[in-house]
């Protein structure tokens, strides 16, 4: 990567201790490096019971843990309570991406993030989810703000991680680190719909656990 002069970031309203909800290494790599470069104290919170199957969940988590250890960042490995997620998703199986099922999913993950933050002295929370162009940033921000609201003094940091080349650096870092490059959002319904689209285009179906950034066909 070329030499980079980063914007100096600061948490809103004088907050100084951040809990970063992370979904995977590719999405969090740029966010982690940007936060660390600004000297902000933070911890990774990995809570993603939506990811299916468990083999996929484990691979994404271990990639994220490896990168956190490389940067000496504390990593909280939360429960994989997938049964709870499926119960909440009942009746939403046919909903499209960015629809109400995704809102439920973000709400669930951010609520647990905010609860952990409250119980462990964090005053601000955020997520790397919004850096992906496949996500609705307003939807994510609304869920984050809603999750933080019940806790007095807590704030959801709604920084736009895509701006000033953040999305491009996300890909650069992923290639540099050879992160596992998942090809669907995470849940079983996303996998189903991604494969249906591929089939309609005459493309090969998704193969779990075999693709890394920088490999052939991974550009």
Image: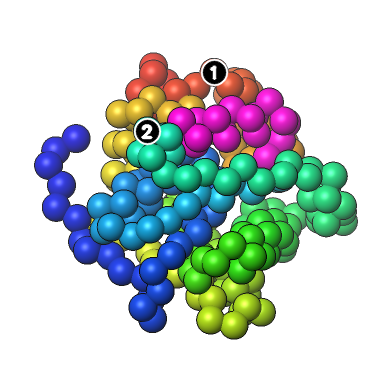
Q: Nearer the viewer, residue 75 or 120?
A: 120
Q: The C terminus is located in which quarter?
A: top left
Question: How far apart, in angstroms, are the residues tagged by discs 1 and 2?
Answer: 23 Å
Residue 164: image x %, image y %? 24, 58
Residue sitting at x 46%, y 30%: 66
Q: Residues within 10 Å of mark 1 (few under 14, many from 20)?
A: few
Q: Main secondary structure of the magenta part?
A: helix
Residue 201: image x %, image y %? 59, 30
Q: Quadrant of residue 191?
A: top right
Residue 51: image x %, image y %? 68, 40
| Relative horizontal placement of residue 40, taking residue 98 as reference (left or right) | left
Q: Is residue 24 above or below residue 126?
A: above
Residue 154: image x %, image y %? 54, 76
Residue sitting at x 31%, y 69%: 10
How is colour applied across the structure in the image? rainbow
Under circle 1, the secondary element is: loop
Magenta span: 51-66
The verdict on residue 14 being magenta is no
Mark sitting on residue 70: 2
Mark sitting on residue 210: 1
Under circle 2, the secondary element is: helix
Q: Nearer the viewer, residue 65 or 109?
A: 65
């Amino acid at each position: 990567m070329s030499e980079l002069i980063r914007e100096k970031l600061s948490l809103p309203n004088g907050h100084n201790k951040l809990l970063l909800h992370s979904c995977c290494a590719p999405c969090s790599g740029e966010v982690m490096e940007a936060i660390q470069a600004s000297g902000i104290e933070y911890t990774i919170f990995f809570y993603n019971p939506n990811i299916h199957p468990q083999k996929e969940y484990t691979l994404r988590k271990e990639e994220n843990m490896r990168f956190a250890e490389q940067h000496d960042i504390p990593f909280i490995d939360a429960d994989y309570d997938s049964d709870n997620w499926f119960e909440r998703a009942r009746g939403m199986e046919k909903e499209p991406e960015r629809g109400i099922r995704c809102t439920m999913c973000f709400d669930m993950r951010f609520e647990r993030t905010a609860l952990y933050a409250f119980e462990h002295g964090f005053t601000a929370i955020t997520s790397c989810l919004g850096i992906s162009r496949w996500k609705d940033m307003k939807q994510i921000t609304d869920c984050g703000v809603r999750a933080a609201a019940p806790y007095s003094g807590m704030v959801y940091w709604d920084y736009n991680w895509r701006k000033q080349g953040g999305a491009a650096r996300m890909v650069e870092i992923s290639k540099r680190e050879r992160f596992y490059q998942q090809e669907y959002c995470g849940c079983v319904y996303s996998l189903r719909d991604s494969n249906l689209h591929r089939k309609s285009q005459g493309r090969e179906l998704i193969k779990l656990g075999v693709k890394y950034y920088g490999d052939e066909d991974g550009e």
